[in-house]
Image (cartoon, rainbow, N blue to C red):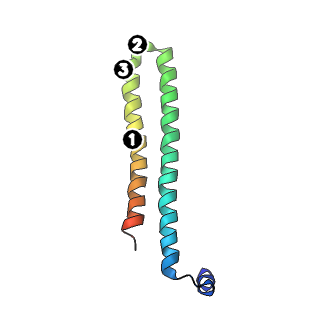
Amino acid sequence: MILEATQATGISGEQVITAARYLGAGLSIGLGAIGAGAGEGVAAGIACQAIARNPEQYGTIFRTMIIGMAIAESTTIYALVISILLLFVVK
């Protein structure tokens, strides 16, 4: 169905693939960044609450929060890699 519609409008298959690459790259990094940002915000908020309740455990809570944020941020880096692959490798 899409193929007939693109042929009727004069859009080539290569143009459809290029548009899909750009759309996929944008969605990949956009959704990846939203997920990591929300996760890191929740982690920081909960860590602040935990430190307020138990200040003598600051070092342990902070260290655990930083490790968790680094792991959450790695998903954004994976999304960035996928976006770069879609933009520059997929033809």
Name the residue tied to disc 2: 56
Is 48 situated above or below 82? above
12 or 51, nearer to the observer? 12
Question: Can you give x and y, in whole percent of width and height, for residue 77 in the image?
Answer: 39, 49
Identify which amino acid the numbered label 3 is placed on.
Gly
Identify which amino acid the numbered label 2 is placed on.
Glu
Whether residues under marks 2 and 3 lie with C-beta atoms below 8 angstroms apart, the answer is: no
Which residue lies at the image location 49% right of the left edge and 21% below the top edge?
50
67 or 21, nearer to the observer? 21
Compared across the picture, whether 62 is left or right of 49 comes to: left
Q: What numbered label is drawn on residue 71?
A: 1
Identify which amino acid the numbered label 1 is placed on.
Ile
Sequence order check, earlier mark of 1 and 2? 2
Q: Total number of numbered labels? A: 3
Location of the C terminus (image quadrant): bottom left
Name the residue tied to disc 3: 59
